[in-house]
Image (cartoon, helix red, strand yellow):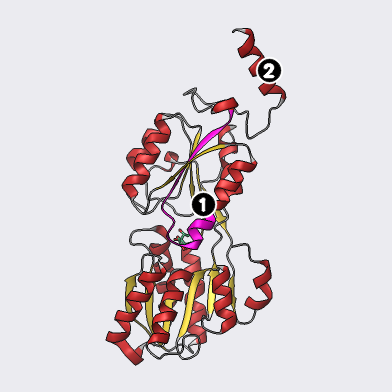
Amino acid sequence: MNRQTFLRLAGGAAACSLAACQPSGPSGGGAGSGGKRVVGFSQIGADNPWRTAETESIKAEAAKRGIELKFSDAQGQQEAQISAMRSFIAQGVQGIILAPKVETGWEAILKEAKDAKIPVVLVDRGVAVADDSLYATLIASDFVAEGTMAGEWLAKKCGGKAGVIQLEGTTGSAPANDRKKGFEAAMASHPEIKVLASQTGDFKRSDGKNVMEALLKVHGAAITAVYAHNDDMAIGAIQALEAAGRRPGKDVVVVSIDGMGFAFDAIVEGKLNATVECNPLLGEMAFAALEQVLKGEALPKLLVQKDRLFDESNAAAERPNRKY
Ligand code: GYE
């Protein structure tokens, strides 16, 4: 070891913090300039404010911890997420944070990360893999519970009788699959609530609006409630309902999930009836989990976020506390 290397290492040890000084792993790579921890984050895209809030949370936490973050926005393409992960592996990052678009199709790339001894922390959506040793942990909400909570609330509000439109999230994604499952489980005990149609709006406001417009033409006055898998699609649906001369929040009950600030505003305005929160601020938890894995500590496979429901009884009081 030459003198310069020795001094750099010694200096590094003196300034050692959890974030910066973990061993770089058996691959030996991953130290960025100045010996910084390097982590890759593969994000699905930036097509709604929830996702942008999550991205910001992860970027801010990396900066706070002095971690060099390699960020990739896959613009909605799973293939692009897989390529980004492959590139993170090739660059020898010390950990990967992945927000997987859909549940299936991840085995091969997760295996590549595992073989390279790079831990993967899943955030916000789960994957369907037979071998759960392919990832370190999943930090997410219980989407089935969210769907059930929304469904029970809607059933009560509608007096057990309604014609519902379900606006589903991205096809094949864990939150779309599970929010549907949870909602339909709740509906099983309400035989007079009919789901008139259930279609994807891809978690996007514009798609929610277009799908609702089309379904209003087919089902018209039979529609008395809307269940949207996220707030953005609910806002799109509210716009379509108003354009069709309906009164969302009054003669059409609208319930959604995410608990975004703009959803609280819509509740206060009386156009949205309820939202079930789903926390996108996962940065701190994601990096804390990654540090634990890198220290060799055991982690539960699932770190569940607890969600609450907000409606006209509590939305206004909670609005000033919302962080997203
Ligand atoms: O509800 C939605 C986003 O995966 C939990 O994805 C997340 C969902 C969230 O696009 O708004």
321 relative to 5, above or below: below
Q: Say which quadrant the N terminus sits in.
A: top right
Say which label, 2 or 1, has the lower sequence index: 2
91 relative to 102, above or below: above
Determine which residue is flagged by label 1. Answer: 55
Task: Report the residue that reaches farthest toward the top.
Answer: 2
Q: What residue type is disc 1 on?
A: Thr
* Pick the front one: 135 or 87: 87
Residue 246 visible? The answer is: yes
* Pick the front one: 230 or 120: 230
Secondary structure type for disc 1: helix
Secondary structure type for disc 2: helix
* Spatial CA span between label 2 and label 1: 34 Å
Is the residue marked by circle 1 packed among few (<14), some (14-19), or many (20+) residues within 10 Å?
Answer: many
Query: Residue 49: within the magenta?
Result: yes
Is the residue marked by circle 2 packed among few (<14), some (14-19), or many (20+) residues within 10 Å?
Answer: few
From the top left corner, tell me how far across and down residue 177 is, in percent. 38, 63
Query: Residue 15: within the magenta?
Result: no
From the viewer's perspective, tell me whether residue 319 is left or right of residue 275.
right
Q: Please count the marks in the image.
A: 2
Which residue is depicted at the point 41% across and 54% down? Answer: 45
The magenta span reads: 36-55
Q: What residue type is disc 2 on?
A: Ala
Circle on res. 10: 2
Which residue is depicted at the point 45% across and 75% down? Answer: 234
From the top left corner, tell me how far across and down residue 121 is, in percent. 49, 43
